[in-house]
Image (cartoon, grey):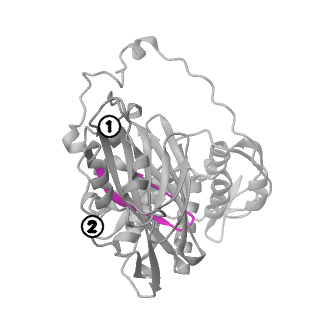
Amino acid sequence: MFKICHNFKKITVCLLWAGMLAGCKTPAPEPEPVEADPLSAASLINLQDPNMIRTPKGASSLDLETPLRCNVNWKTQEMITALPYNMKAFNLTRNGINNPLPRFEVTGFSFKTMPAEKALLKLLKEADIRLVAKDAPYTSISAENLRGELSEVVKMITDAAEIYYNYNAETKTLTISRKNNFTLYVPKSRPIILALLDVLRGSGITNITTDWSDYSITFDADFELRTKIQDLLDYFEENPVLIAYDVSVFTIYPYNAQNDIEWQKLLNIFDFGTIKTAKTGVIGRVLTTSDDLNFKTLQRFLSGQARVVKAAEGKFVVPNLWLARFDIGKCAARKSPEAQVSLLAKSSLMPQNRIFSDITLEGTEGQITQFNIRSKLGENFLIIGIPNEIFGISSPKSETIVFMVPRIIRTLKKQVPTAN
């Protein structure tokens, strides 16, 4: 099947270019059901078992982001900030052992509609390389007449199936999986690293490790997420705009538990035009206001009707046209009902410093409410009328409100060599 030639081992195989591979994908076969051994099943621990030993909440709640994330200076807010950054500092690297594959030359390899792991097993068998598939089965593909070095052919197959491979030369083992561990190095800029963290969380990635000494973020990513992160890095090539939101979340309890908060009284206290718009969502309403209705005047208004409890405050950063996520629990008391709430925002900067914000409040059970908000720079918005029953608070007429101030960060890239 193969012979030595010019210091290379040649494996007889067939040729197909990567584009042809991608075009031949078929749905992955469903795995055969595996029957559980009743003896082993009986010994499994219920994940909801109250007696299960867990990491103490005090240790779990330690969050190194808190000093940067959860402090807002409401007295002095810069509506437009210029932020220079070093473009060369961006660097996305794969982690783990990935030695070069042996220099086998592939002269012909064919297979018809089989899962990628079986195709690789067939390819690597004569090279005496062990294959480990961490999360098979993978996408089924077909190929004809593949030609080139072994590393090139393996890459064609894995790229077509959208899986990663890592080779350990010491154990002669090729490991394949849908995800790989990456480290993203970023410029030493707090708004930029917060923006990237918020975008990763907006993509559903929560298992993130941030090293604040070298401004790096480590996470697992599949092909789709890696492409999205690379697109975001390309976006920073264009001197992008970042939209920052300062957020304060209040829980309010009317002095008279039989009466609602009379929001209509805002029109008696503030000049006409202070409240620009009022829009209704699935639950609650959102008001767009001038800065006359600000953090201080809002508290003064509320204190006349209710006991006001600050649940959380913090900030998050959204790259223009990207989706970002702010987990309110990062800046809330551990036992606070609002700690399970997240804000998702997709924002865009429009001409004349107008900001379009698509804001979603999300809880553990899914979406709570959603608003599309069109505002000008210097205007605030206030989400009102979110009943506290949603969060399990049995206090009639009480509400949760969210006060938000959008700001603009204009970035300016520099080209400076870096060690990252």
The correct choice, above or below, for 264 with respect to 49 in the image is below
Q: Residue at x 69, y 39 (%)?
A: 28
Q: Which residue is mark 1?
A: 337
User: Dividing the image into 4 quarters, which one contains the C terminus?
Assistant: bottom left
User: Along the horizontal axis of the image, is 394 left or right of 18?
Assistant: left
Q: Residue at x 25, y 43 (%)?
A: 60
Q: Amino acid at mark 2?
A: Asn
**Outermost front residue:** 268
Checking the image for residue 143, the label placed there is none
Q: Residues within 10 Å of mark 2 (few under 14, many from 20)?
A: few
Residue numbers of the magenta segment:
311-326
In percent of width and height, residue 233 lies at 52, 71
Q: Is residue 257 visible?
A: yes
User: Along the horizontal axis of the image, is 399 left or right of 87?
Assistant: left
Q: Amino acid at mark 1?
A: Pro
In magenta stretch: residue 331: no
Under tag 2, what secondary structure? Answer: loop
Viewer-nearest residue: 366 or 26: 366
Q: Which residue is mark 2?
A: 73
Q: Residues within 10 Å of mark 1 (few under 14, many from 20)?
A: some
The correct choice, above or below, for 410 with respect to 323 in the image is below
Q: Main secondary structure of the magenta part?
A: strand
Question: Residue 49's quadrant in the figure?
Answer: top left
Distance Cα–Cα, label 1 vs label 2: 25 Å
Viewer-nearest residue: 111 or 341: 341
In percent of width and height, residue 355 lies at 54, 67
How many numbered circles are shown? 2
User: Along the horizontal axis of the image, is 136 left or right of 418?
Assistant: right
In magenta stretch: residue 317: yes
Viewer-nearest residue: 61 or 216: 61
In percent of width and height, residue 403 lies at 38, 55
